[in-house]
């Protein structure tokens, strides 16, 4: 039973709360954590927060915010109260995420080859042809294992009914996994005694799993491949992550100018010892900047001839160019049908109900109910360009009414979900804040799902926007196995 004091004013009745159930009792998986926090008391909890903030500064964990005033490096916003998920539930989620990415890769491979799903009438041809991430330059390509999206970050939300839903799939250059790992490092520093007493699944195996997956993609399976992480450079918002993952994997961190494609259509890295052949590139650069020979002619971020080398089968690119055709919020609506079509299985994880503004009847409904809905552009990320109807002004609603009418293909709408909440340290007390979860799924020779993922939290009271670029933060995510 939760006693008064730190939980005295905690109200968990406005949404499904991950830790505190109805009546103020902790959920079964959270009982030990709740009691532990109670035993610490608020002064000690605030002391642990100060220790976490000091650790973040010491470790140099930052992210970059782009603004009119320039790029600003900020310390990673971290809330010390973890989010817990029971292992039994997570096993189902893990299986569902693997199923989803497998179907998405089947779809991408189909789109660039037979296009059978279009011929069979399940996905409209116009949907693909009008996609800003469809790359005709990739037609006819078949990457190793038929796997185009090797690293995926799928965003999950828990609604008021207690169920987890997939909100979207990020298949281009998903970010955040380094913060998931560093969050656990910080938690071990500030709550060592708690972690010793609970059976929490580790997350620090991700770099090893990533390395093994990238190795499996190498064109020549007999050699030890040379792996490089291709970054746009230090001014990119995710540069910390690029450097972190390269260091953890023992891979080379390179920029476009460090690589060269020779007449043999192979990629080489400039080193102090001379040119060294590169077999696998984990690229953190958008498609259109990858190769000035094929895409943006003035790009200085990519490598001239890289697409040539990839098409010749001399280098593997993860994620493959063109994978973003499935990273489209309109395509997202078709994923359950893809699972049935390609895998002959029922979807394990449900989608959030979605209205396609490209459909005249659904569009009419959206336009008539904008104050109740969340409207998203098809290919934006980071929480940009969206309308949260219940929190929008009349001016914003009028603007989106116009935008949707001008380009209905570019918008989807979803119900405003009562995202689950989790206790968060705000203003020297624990308050509920809305959260989501981004697990990371790998697919190459095998599939792998992180034990949990990056829990993102909206630090502003009542806000549903969890993106760090929009004022959100993050929490450590614990998958807790109570049976061992």
Image: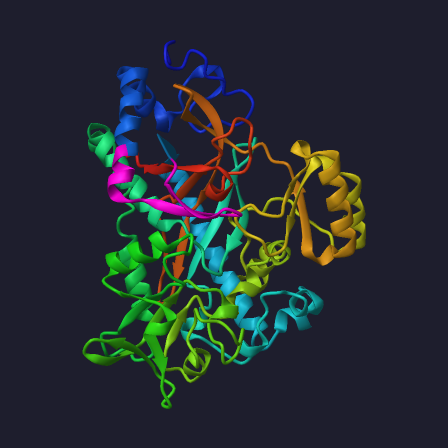
Q: Is residue 30 left or right of residue 460?
A: left
For the point 54% across and 38% down, which residue is it? 465
Regarding residue 1, the answer to whether it shows in the image is no
At which x and y percent is residue 134?
A: 59, 69
Is residue 90 rendered magenta in the image?
no
Label tally? 0
Q: Nearer the viewer, residue 379 or 484?
A: 379
**Residue at 54% from the left image edge and 50% from the top image edge:** 168
Q: Is residue 55 magenta?
A: yes
Q: Quadrant of residue 89?
A: top left
Out of 54 and 444, give the one closest to the viewer: 54
The percent position of residue 78, horizontal first and vertical second, equals: 37, 35
Q: Which residues are magenta?
A: 54-77
Q: Position of residue 319 (x, y in %)?
A: 43, 66
Q: Is 33 above or below relative to 276?
A: above
Q: Position of residue 246 (x, y in %)?
A: 28, 60
In percent of the image, x 68 and y 36: which residue is there?
389
Please name whichever residue, 78 or 4, is drawn nearer the observer in this view of the structure: 78
410 sits to left or right of 107: right
Using the image as rendered, state which of residue 60 and residue 3 is in the foreground: 60
Quadrant for the N terminus, please.
top left
**Which residue is at 29% across, 46% downward?**
203
Q: Quadrant of residue 296?
A: bottom right
Q: Residue furthest front?
A: 69
Residue occupying the far bottom of the picture: 263
> In which quadrant will I find the C terminus?
top left
Q: From the viewer's perspective, is residue 39 above or below residue 335? A: above
Tell me where residue 454 sits by quadrant. Answer: top left
Left or right: 346 as drawn, with respect to 438: right
């Amino acid at each position: 039973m939760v006693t008064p004091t730190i939980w005295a004013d905690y109200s968990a009745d406005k949404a499904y709360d991950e830790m505190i159930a109805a009546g103020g009792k902790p959920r079964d998986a959270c009982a030990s954590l709740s009691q532990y926090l109670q035993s610490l008391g608020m002064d000690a909890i605030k002391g642990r927060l100060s220790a976490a903030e000091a650790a973040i500064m010491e470790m140099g964990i930052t992210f970059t915010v782009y603004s009119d005033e320039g790029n600003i490096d900020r310390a990673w916003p971290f809330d010390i109260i973890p989010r817990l998920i029971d292992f039994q539930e997570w096993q189902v989620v893990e299986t569902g995420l693997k199923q989803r990415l497998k179907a998405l890769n089947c779809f991408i491979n189909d789109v660039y080859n037979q296009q059978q799903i279009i011929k069979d009438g399940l996905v409209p041809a116009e949907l693909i042809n009008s996609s800003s991430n469809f790359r005709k330059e990739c037609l006819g390509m078949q990457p190793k294992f038929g796997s185009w999206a090797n690293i995926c970050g799928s965003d999950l939300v828990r609604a008021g009914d207690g169920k987890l839903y997939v909100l979207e799939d990020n298949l281009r250059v998903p970010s955040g996994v380094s913060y998931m790992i560093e969050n656990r490092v910080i938690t071990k520093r500030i709550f060592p005694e708690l972690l010793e007493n609970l059976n929490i699944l580790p997350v620090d195996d991700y770099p090893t799993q990533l390395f093994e997956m990238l190795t499996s993609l190498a064109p020549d399976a007999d050699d030890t491949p040379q792996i490089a992480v291709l970054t746009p450079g230090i001014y990119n918002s995710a540069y910390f992550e690029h450097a972190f993952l390269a260091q953890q994997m023992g891979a080379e961190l390179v920029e476009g100018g460090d690589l060269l494609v020779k007449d043999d259509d192979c990629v080489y890295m400039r080193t102090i010892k001379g040119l060294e052949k590169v077999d696998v590139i984990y690229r953190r650069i958008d498609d259109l900047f990858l190769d000035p020979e094929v895409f943006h002619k003035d790009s200085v971020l990519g490598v001239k001839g890289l697409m040539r080398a990839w098409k010749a089968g001399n280098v593997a690119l993860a994620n493959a160019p063109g994978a973003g055709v499935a990273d489209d919020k309109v395509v997202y609506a078709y994923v359950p049908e893809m699972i049935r079509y390609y895998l002959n299985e029922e979807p394990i994880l449900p989608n959030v109900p979605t209205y396609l503004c490209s459909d005249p009847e659904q569009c009419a409904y959206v336009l008539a109910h904008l104050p109740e809905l969340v409207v998203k552009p098809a290919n934006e990320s980071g929480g940009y360009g969206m309308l949260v109807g219940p929190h929008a002004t009349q001016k914003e609603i009028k603007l989106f009414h116009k935008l949707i009418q001008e380009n209905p293909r570019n918008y989807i709408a979803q119900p405003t979900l009562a995202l689950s909440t989790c206790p968060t340290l705000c203003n020297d007390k624990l308050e509920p804040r809305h959260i989501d979860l981004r697990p990371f799924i790998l697919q190459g020779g095998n599939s792998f799902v992180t034990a949990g993922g990056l829990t993102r939290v909206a630090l502003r009271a009542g806000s549903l926007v969890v993106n760090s670029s929009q004022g959100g933060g993050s929490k450590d995510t614990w998958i807790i196995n109570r049976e061992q």
